[in-house]
Image (cartoon, rainbow, N blue to C red):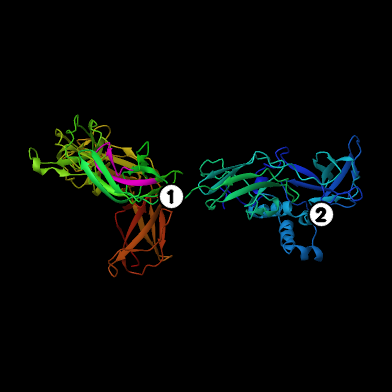
Amino acid sequence: MSSVRLCVQIVILLISGLAFAQSPTAKVLVHNARGNSAARAIVEVKWYSQRFVYPKGVNLYRRESGESTWTKLNKTPILPQRTVPAPLLQRDGDLDTFLDMARNINSMENNGFMLLNLFAKSFQSGDFSKLAGIQFDDVTAQWSKTYEYRVTLVNNNGESELALSNPVTVGNYRPVAAVADFTVKLEKATAKMTWREEQERFYGINVYRSALPDSGTWKKINKTPVVLTETEGAPDSDVMYQDADLQQGMTYYYRIAGLDFFGGETQLSQKVEITIGDITPPPPPLNLEKKVNVQEATISWDTQPVEDLAGFHLYRSAKSDGPFEKITTQLVAKSDTSYTDLVPQPGFYYYEVAAADEAGNERHSNPIMVEVQDVIPPQAPAQLTIEADTGRFVLRWAKNKEADIKGYYVYRTIAENKNNSFLLVNAEPLTDTMYVQVLAKNASNKFMFRVAALDTSYNKSEPSEIVSARLPDVTPPIKPLIKNIVLRNDTIVVMWLDNPEPDLRGFNVYRSREGSDARMRVNGDSLVRASASQYGDTVKAAGVYAYQIEAVDESGNASELSDPFPFTKKETFNFAFGEIEAKYHKRKKAVMLEWSQPRKPSGYMVLRRSQDEPAWKPVTGMIADAGFEDKTVSEKTEYYYQVRAYSNSGEVVASTPVMVRTGK
């Protein structure tokens, strides 16, 4: 037994909103309790919404039909219970687990599996519904009176309405009317069932079966309630439940009952009777043999005679594992033991012969393979064209008219007028009439192509006409290399190594400044000639520059830019010393130096040498004043002094040395 549609936990229907289609948010259900009498009447009230439990509780109100005043039935808010009373736990050991689950869930979002189980339990167990705070038994309802019930949600602002029930008249418990339109169709040994879906009355189905018409022998055959949901990707079917593996010759009776939301069943449906007829197929044909004449395949077999044999059907497939297609529109007579099939085209075919009895049962033979050979090659492909693009050739040709074309082979060579030099470029036949041959972008040969057609019998045509072409030049020159940059007068001269390309057109020279991404082509619109290996750039402003070279060939392909080569153009330091005055001051025992400064440099440094110290040595650090007093001299010594002026960029201008003699 199995369900054709997905039979899952019963609450999937509730979650999807099918059962509560009248209200988008909540539903209050009312029901006369089983065992009701005029002496003891109970109305069971149950409510559902997008949340399962209500932490702050709900209030329940009732009014009699025709009245406007609502009477509150509960003294305190109806809340989920914290514990399960011992008598209830003895009756249902799962109540504690489900109640704990209910207290720890707030909404349907991200809690689908838990909610499925909670709603299922609430449908089946009134005890659990009351423990969870979603059911109330009205024991004060009066016999024969009609009531409406109103549920309000307790919140921080008081209470707000959750939903209203439909009217209910207090009376005896009556099962809901039977499920309508119950049908059972027999397909071999399987009973396939359908019924009318009415989600407002019942959420699921129980299926009962009997081998006797006596109503006392009915047995429920579904382990869990049958709930119908659409499963994505499942094949379309009207079958709602199926009972399989039934016994041949047996008669079965079926009835169904719907399941309401208070754990009860509807009335049983009408009884449907089915009888399982002959479902035993005849023995299969044996010893299949084949004969082929051009495109005709004759299959013969041995028959295993049985009393109810009706004849034979033949099935054919292009694959050994099928699928097999029936090729006989009528039964081959049971006295015949062969059949001739005209195949649509040459190739490999597989045949099965099925023996059929009077009841339509079939049993297939083992398959037999038949090869119908084709020895006629197709015509040579026509209208072959070629287009050359960057690193590829695109070949196109007209589709062959033969129906059994398997594909096409493409051949290539670079040797003209040599038919035996063509090489096959595609291992598998092409099913399209276009082929893209990808080659190295720098390939410079002239390439020739031709195409041959192949049919499904692997007959190959004569080759097509030959087409030829060359690839466009898309290979750029190699990246240039700058070897040096020098300054000549005010011109920055950039020098680079020669590029080896024979099709080189020239160079572009680019300059950028330190700290800037902007790059300027300094040679203007005209390339520097290909034979040149240097270029002079006149730059007046001092600063740090970077130069890069780009090589360009005759096809316009440009190389990568060379690595940046930095060059610093220093600011011109136009400084000239005037006369330097140097004298010895006897009283101070010091040499006094003074000089004129036509413009103020960044600083000065004074250097000194003597006969004892012939190398120039600084006697000051960097000083700003145009004068210096040297107190480190010795008596009766001849000293030479030189003053050096420094620019901001580090350039140096040295004065003419002056001589001073100390003492007498």
Q: Is 570 one of the magenta-colored residues?
A: no
Which secondary structure, mark 1?
loop
Q: What range of the chain is rendered magenta?
A: 335-355
Q: Which residue is mark 1?
A: 281
Q: Residue at x 87, y 40 (%)?
A: 147
The disc labelled 1 sits on which kind of residue?
A: Pro
Which secondary structure, mark 2?
loop
Q: Position of residue 650 (x, y in %)?
A: 36, 52
Eye-nearest disc, 2 or 1? 1
How packed mark 2 is, by other alpha carbons closer than 10 Å (few <14, some 14-19, many 20 or more), is some
Q: Residue at x 30, y 46 (%)?
A: 350
Q: Which residue is mark 2?
A: 79
Left or right: residue 81 compared with residue 513: right
**Can you say which quadrant of the picture contains the C terminus?**
bottom left
Looking at the picture, tell me which residue is in the foreground, 492 or 46.
Answer: 46
Q: Is 353 one of the magenta-colored residues?
A: yes
Looking at the picture, tell me which residue is in the foreground, 15 or 308.
Answer: 308
Q: Residue at x 15, y 44 (%)?
A: 423
Magenta portion: prevailing SS class: strand
Q: How many marks?
A: 2
Q: Tell me the quarter of the picture where residue 476 sits.
A: top left
Looking at the picture, tell me which residue is in the foreground, 362 or 459.
Answer: 362
How packed mark 1 is, by other alpha carbons closer than 10 Å (few <14, some 14-19, many 20 or more), is some
Q: Tell me the quarter of the picture where residue 503 sits.
A: top left
- Residue 369 in sight: yes
Q: Position of residue 309 (x, y in %)?
A: 40, 46
- Residue 84 in sight: no
The disc labelled 2 sits on which kind of residue?
A: Leu
Q: Position of residue 653 (x, y in %)?
A: 32, 52
